[in-house]
Image (cartoon, helix red, strand yellow):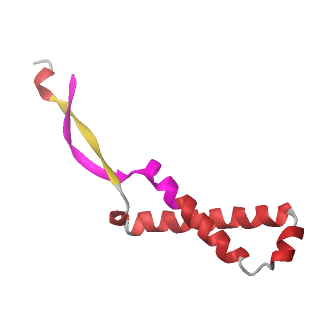
Amino acid sequence: MGLDIGGHYDVPDWPKMGPSLLIATALILAIRTAKWSPISRVHESNRDLEVEIEYASHLAGRVLSALVVRKPEIFTSKRVPWYQANDDDAPK
């Protein structure tokens, strides 16, 4: 029994969304740490910065997920075939 392509459907192209997630995370981090004074940045513990990075990536991921669900057309997508059984090869 063979399979034929029954059609295609569009799905988000996740590997191409990586740069979007990176840029969004960097922007959130920049906005959240812009209030830090230059002197305090030198003395801030790495833990505080790690917490901010973690929060920024979490927030950017949530926003991206919500947008993909609600507005998938604004992102690049790829066509994925769906298959159906080929009845020509079925035993008679």
Q: Which residue is situated farthest in the top direction here?
A: 91
Can residue 91 be found in the magenta stretch?
no
Query: What stretch of residues is rendered in magenta?
Result: 1-20
> Where's residue 56, x and y in %?
66, 67
> Where's residue 26, x and y in %?
62, 65
Can residue 15 be found in the magenta stretch?
yes
Q: Quadrant of the C terminus?
A: top left
Q: Nearer the viewer, residue 66 or 44?
A: 44
> Where's residue 5, x and y in %?
20, 36
Q: Quadrant of the N terminus?
A: top left
Residue at x 77% of width, y 61% of height: 50
Residue 18 higher or lower than 37, as above or below: above
Q: Number of numbered discs present?
A: 0
Residue at x 40% of width, y 69% of height: 70
Q: Nearer the viewer, residue 55 or 42?
A: 42
Residue at x 44% of width, y 68% of height: 67
Rendered image quadrant of residue 33: bottom right
| Left or right: 55 in relation to 79 | right
Q: Which residue is situated farthest in the front direction here?
A: 38
> Where's residue 52, x and y in %?
74, 67
Residue 46 higher or lower than 38, as above or below: above
